Image: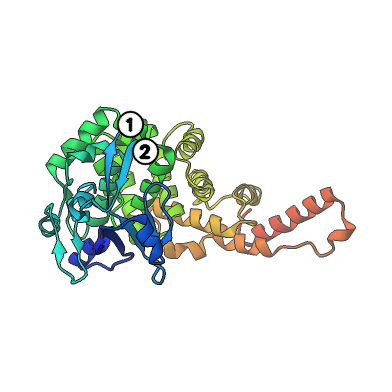
Amino acid sequence: MKIYQVGGAVRDEILNLPVQDRDYVVVGASVEEMLKQGFIPVGNDFPVFLHPTTHEEYALARTERKQGRGYKGFVIHASPEVTLEEDLQRRDLTINAMARDAEGHLIDPYGGLRDCQERVLRHVSDAFIEDPVRILRVARFAARFSHPLGFSVAPETMALMQYMSASGEVDALVAERVWQEIARGLMENTPSELFRVLEQCGALYKIIPQLINVYPSYHELTLPFIDQLAQLNLPLRQRFAGLVLTLFSQTKEANQTIALLCRQLKCPKECNELATLTYQLAHEPLFNKELSAEYALSLIERADAIRRPQRYQEAFELVMLFYKKPLTEIPHHPLWLVHHELIAVKLTDPETLSVPEKIATLKALRLAKLRQYGFN
């Protein structure tokens, strides 16, 4: 039995990046041997184990053979006879197909070190075309490593990705996996690269067909905006909402399009809700100094700002950024200031009032507070 550290940890050490997780491949061992040594089985599709002490992942060396369409159409073969080189050959990119032995020696049969040095994302073998998820992964790695490291996709790898898109292999991707990679890509250093690479290889409009009709604004507005949100280190839900806002800001029937997109991607509820609210808030007259108290209250209530202030704040931040307003202005914006005051408005003696009276009294108190803040 021989154990090798593999994948991202090896790559990131070479690139002088922080190592998040360490994964290991075990060569020359069986499932029974791993269990005897106390390893904990966790893999459903192939033999993966957790170390009994460190809880790091250890996988038996394996090969994969394509049998059906899509990313699930693989036959997995894991046995003591599978070599390290065979295991590394099934990986997507050369920079992810390196290993270190117990003494720290680098094993690099496919040129990963060279590609790290030359800043190239290159496929390991032509078996790359067997898994459409690899298109998404390459795009995500481009988003991670293009800036500031300067990585780019090798021309021959891009050619394979274009072939996969044209051949319909991308159509076999399921929504959950698409969302997983898009979400990861949005959280990288330069998320715009995710979309540039997907567009260049012809996969973008197959994965997100709603983008076909918003192509012009997509380049000019969306890509710089989502990079700005990344620089501000905003959470995923805000980055997704910012993406949606810029894509569909001028689109007719945008609410329906946004709802369709969120359903198609099966994105989390918090992303869906914030994207919808941000779009709606961006089309309100937030900067109209003559706004009436009635309209301001209606706006705040429609945004559910009193009950869910954090979501309102996150949407408000995105709208301010969208209109190129400094975030330092938010605490001084009347609709922001008064919204905090409205949260504190309470009925003094609610038990004595009927439900209609409670609603009317609370509305009157809130309108009075709005008028104190200059809403007429």
Q: CA distance from mark 1 to mark 2?
A: 7 Å
Colour theme: rainbow
- Residue ID at (61%, 61%): 338
Rendered image quadrant of residue 41: bottom left
Count every numbered label the image shows and give the total: 2
Residue 328: % across, % down: 43, 65
- What residue is disc 2 on? 72
Q: Is residue 222 visible?
A: yes
Q: Secondary structure at mark 1?
A: loop
Q: Is residue 232 visible?
A: no
Residue 292: % across, % down: 62, 49
Callout 2 crowding tier (Cα within 10 Å): few <14, some 14–19, many ≥20: some
Callout 1 crowding tier (Cα within 10 Å): few <14, some 14–19, many ≥20: few
Check disc 1 and give the amino acid type: Gly
- What residue is disc 1 on? 68
Residue 183: % across, % down: 39, 50
Q: Report if the CB atoms under discs 1 and 2 are less than 8 Å apart.
A: yes
Check disc 2 and give the amino acid type: Lys
Q: Secondary structure at mark 2?
A: loop
* Nearer to the camera, 120 or 338: 120
- Residue ID at (61%, 56%): 308
* Picture layout, residue 254 above or below residue 333: above
The quadrant the N terminus occupies is: bottom left
* Picture layout, residue 256 above or below residue 374: above
* Nearer to the camera, 51 or 283: 51
Residue occupying the far top of the picture: 167
- Residue ID at (36%, 35%): 207
The answer to whether 123 appears left or right of 374 in the picture is left
Residue 333: % across, % down: 51, 60
Residue 117: which disc? none
